[in-house]
Amino acid sequence: MRNVEDELLVRRVAVSDDAGAISELYDRYGGVIYGLGVRYLGDRSLAEDLVQDVFLSVWRNAASFDPSRAAFATWLYRITRNRATDLVRRRKARVQMVGGETLLDAGEDPVREMVRSFDLASALAGLSSIHRDLLLMAYMEGLTQREIAHRTDTPLGTVKSRTTSALRALRETMLPEQERAGNE
Amino acid sequence: MSEHARIRDLIGPYLIEGLDRDESREVEDHLRRCVACQRETQDLSRVHERMSELAEAVEAPPPGLKSRVMHTLPDRRRRMLSLSAAAVFLVAVAIAAILYASGVFVQEPIASASLSPTSHAPEAGGEIQLYETNSNNIEVHIETWGLPKCERGEYYQVWFAEGDERISGGTFTIGPDGRAEMDLSAARLATNYTQVGVASETARKAPGSTGKKVLGGKLGSL
């Protein structure tokens, strides 16, 4: 399941109500959505509601996702932004100020940062499980190279060279986005 | 393995400060002399920065949230229990027919779309689902939020479109909280159109003309 592309998972949700597929999408993007919710809505309870609303929307509208029009990460980002806007209006919550601006009137930079987070989460999902797990341990869990070697029962030298090859693999997955960025 | 290849393999852990002091010094000495490895390091440092940003953005949701999310996903299908006795099966079929006619069974939508805002209503959003009925019309369930208030004589209209052709999916106004959720009725012909949108209209104009489009989406079939 881990190497299946996001688009295939959404298709499984649309065609066969595949709970395993939506569960995998949650594992890939739940942390990004929750973290952005905490950061931009300023409330953990609202962030939890945001995660729930987003995945309910994915479940309901999976059939309307068209990969020829937008990447999955872009589609998911738009749903997240829509739902975050709706949550704020419904709950009349105070939105945390980020750099002097709220989510509702966020200028280009905070929005671009959110999009970049979704894009990178999507790129990570495209890596092999060995590379992805290694990067998640190093960056998300903050493990040292030695700790990763111990946890995975892998020689330290192998962990070091795999770290480099994982970053290279991620660079290749991100390459079209970087080229687009260079053309902007 | 050559020294160049060995050092090149250490660029990753060097960037994440995963080398000891001696190894770091070795890498830095090599980078001073090797242009190819300098370029590789610059390239991979951009990836490293993006990963560091993501690590700051991501936060693990509370442990029970996934279970809560999975349990709130509606079951779109109701499955008949498999029955061994033919007589009981026939009775069950008869009961099911009666219940279906009375609308007890939850129907699954035949098409749906997530609605994205246009520049006329950048804070808006919505969702739309189409349902079968027993008549020549279809049921249109629409939920919107963030739309601007309707001034006197103004309202919103759902449009189904394909190229230059369009038909109406019904009209509505929004509540004081800026939200609307309702069931409208549209001609079955609407299922032939793939584009759906919401436009703000004014009662003073002729019914066929279209006001400003505020929401749009593409219908996907289920």
Image: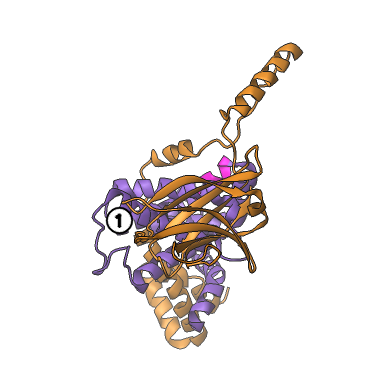
Residue sitting nearer the eye, B16 or B62: B62
| Left or right of B135 on screen, residue B74 | left
SS category of the residue bearing label 1: helix
Identify the coloring: by chain
Magenta segment main secondary structure: helix
> Residue B147, image x and y in percent?
39, 59
Chain B tint as drawn: orange
Magenta stretch: includes residue B64: no
Disc 1 marks which amino acid?
A: Leu
Question: Is residue A21 magenta-colored?
Answer: yes
Q: Quadrant of residue A169?
A: bottom right
Kindly identify which residue carries mark 1. Answer: A41
* Letter of the chain in purple: A
Q: Please say if A127 is above or below B179.
A: below
Residue A86 x, y percent position in the rendering: 37, 53
Q: Quadrant of the N terminus of chain B?
A: bottom right
Q: Which residues are magenta?
A: A19-25
**Can you see residue A153?**
no
Residue B58 is drawn in which quadrant? bottom left
Classed neighbour count for the residue bearing mark 1: other residues with Cα under 10 Å, few (<14), some (14–19), many (≥20): many
Residue displayed at 65% across by 46% down: A15
Counting from the top left corner in percent of width and height, residue B27 is at 43, 77
**Quadrant of res B92:** top right
Residue A97: percent from left, percent from top: 24, 63
Against A140, residue B4 (above or below) is below
Residue at left 26%, top 51%?
A: A92
